[in-house]
Amino acid sequence: MALKIIVFLGSVRPGRNCTRVSNFMKKELEKRNHNVTIFDPLLMDFPLLKKPLHFHAPNETPPEWLVKYNSLIEKADAFVAISGEYNRCIPPAFANMLDHFPPKSFKCKPCSIVCYSAGPGGGSTAGMQLRYFLGELGMVTPGFMFTIPVVHEAHAEDGTPAPTNATAVSKANRVISELEWYAEALKTQTEKCGLP
């Protein structure tokens, strides 16, 4: 079953590595016939959050771009969070981007976590924080978390795994398989019973 999947990126700084990972994951998702949309806070130019969409009063008109992006989130079947680790935390740009939207837009949809770092930890500390953050927004995080240590050596700029990164494809397939399972199960239950 082809899914509509949004991939969230979390880095905006010069020399960022998130595109190495997103290029790789996008290719692997598309190999399985999924429709992939990238939410990139650098290219989409999210402002510093002052007023989330759901904080607008009924008599107010939210910005058109915010309504448009929220509509894409509402129509998605699943998500992938691709995050680096800044000072053992989620990158500020990642939280700033997602905090623009109401939790009901994400509710009861799965979000797989793919983390990376320049060092040996693979971004796992940020990954654990993402479980809390994404859960608070209403998403379900499958069990397997794909971590990529020394990312600048593990993937080329176009996403191609380095020869030394022999497990990249198998790990991507595992994270995607879990995402597919959760997406189909949650979609079926939502269609049958509605949202809780």
Image (cartoon, grey):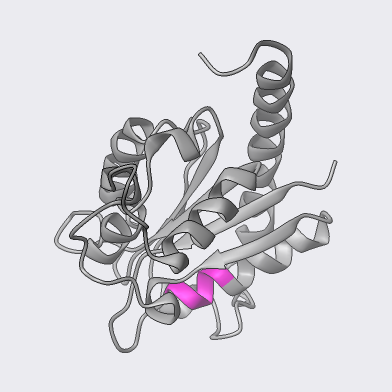
In the displayed orientation, state which residue is furthest to the left.
87
Looking at the image, is 78 positioned above or below residue 164?
above
- Image spot of residue 78 (x, y percent): 61, 43
88 and 96: which one is in front? 96
Q: Quadrant of residue 117?
A: bottom left
Which residue is depicted at the point 34% across and 88% down?
A: 15
x and y percentages locating residue 97 in the rendered image: 34, 60
- Which region shows up in magenta? 18-22
Asked if 146 appears above or below 141 in the picture, the reply is: below
| Location of residue 172 with respect to 40 vertically, above or below | above
- In the image, residue 142 lies at what x, y percent? 53, 32
To which quarter of the image does residue 85 belong? bottom left
Residue at point 67%, 46% (across, down): 176
The magenta stretch spans residue 20 = yes
Indicate left or right for 92 with 67 as reference: left
- Residue 133 drawn in magenta: no
Residue at 66%, 41% (x, y): give it: 77
| Residue 164 visible in the displayed image | no
Q: Quadrant of the N terminus?
A: top right
Of residue 178 and residue 134, the one placed in the foreground of this image is: 134
- Which SS does the magenta portion mostly show? helix
Q: Is residue 182 above or below residue 81?
A: above
How far from the left and from the top, in percent, is residue 127? Answer: 34, 46
Choose top left, top right, bottom left or bottom right for residue 23. bottom right
For residue 132, side relative to residue 26 (left or right): left
